[in-house]
Image (cartoon, rainbow, N blue to C red):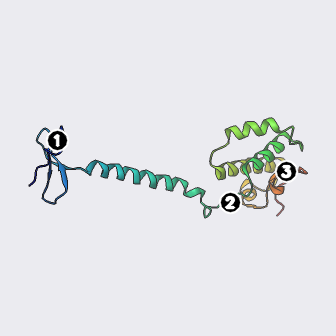
Amino acid sequence: MRNCAALVPDSPSLRFGENQALERTPPSGGRSVPHWAPMRSIFATFCICVLLWVNARAAELPGAECPVHGELVHWIADYCILTLETDDEIAAGDCIVKELAIASKDQCKAKLQYKRAMCRAVVIRDSRDTIEKCMADRSFAGSTVTNGGVGAQQIPRAPTE
């Protein structure tokens, strides 16, 4: 075995082991450790972090489609217009700002929550159908969602089936 300690001043003793990998002998005289061992654990940790990140982003991929169409801000606008019983999006501005601040960061989850709240309000107001039937109706949405933005506002009606 060849000792390389003379080549590297002020370092732990370096030598080539049985498998010819550069090894470090700890100053305490314990077991020698390959020089790449700490890097292997760092690399493993990095790989685990990447896999967790990819898994967290999987819900945002195009293949994972939300059952509620439209933009979240449009659902919030329609929700505010419905709860304030107005057709003026300017009057609903404060409500929209408040709801945007408290809405879930998960866009799909937030749209489902606002659709359910709108369904509940319409079912209670019109005294017919069920919230589940309303949620299953893909055409149920306010005019802001339907038009892709503000325009001629109409208060949503319960599904008619």
In the picture, the disc for residue 40 is none
Q: Is residue 22 left or right of residue 148?
A: left
Amino acid at dot 3: Asp
N-term-proximal mark, 2 vs 3: 2
Q: Position of residue 14 (x, y in %)?
A: 16, 47
Q: Which residue is under mark 3?
A: 126
Picture mark count? 3
Q: Which one is closest to the eye, mark 2 or mark 1? A: 1
Callout 2: SS: loop
Separation (CA) of disc 2 from disc 1: 62 Å
Where residue 28 sits, quadrant-wise, is: top left
Question: Which residue is under mark 2?
Answer: 67
Residue plotted at (76% across, 49% down): 75
Q: Who comes first in sequence, dot 3 or dot 1?
A: 1
* Label 1 SS: loop
In-image side of 74 versus 90 (left or right): left
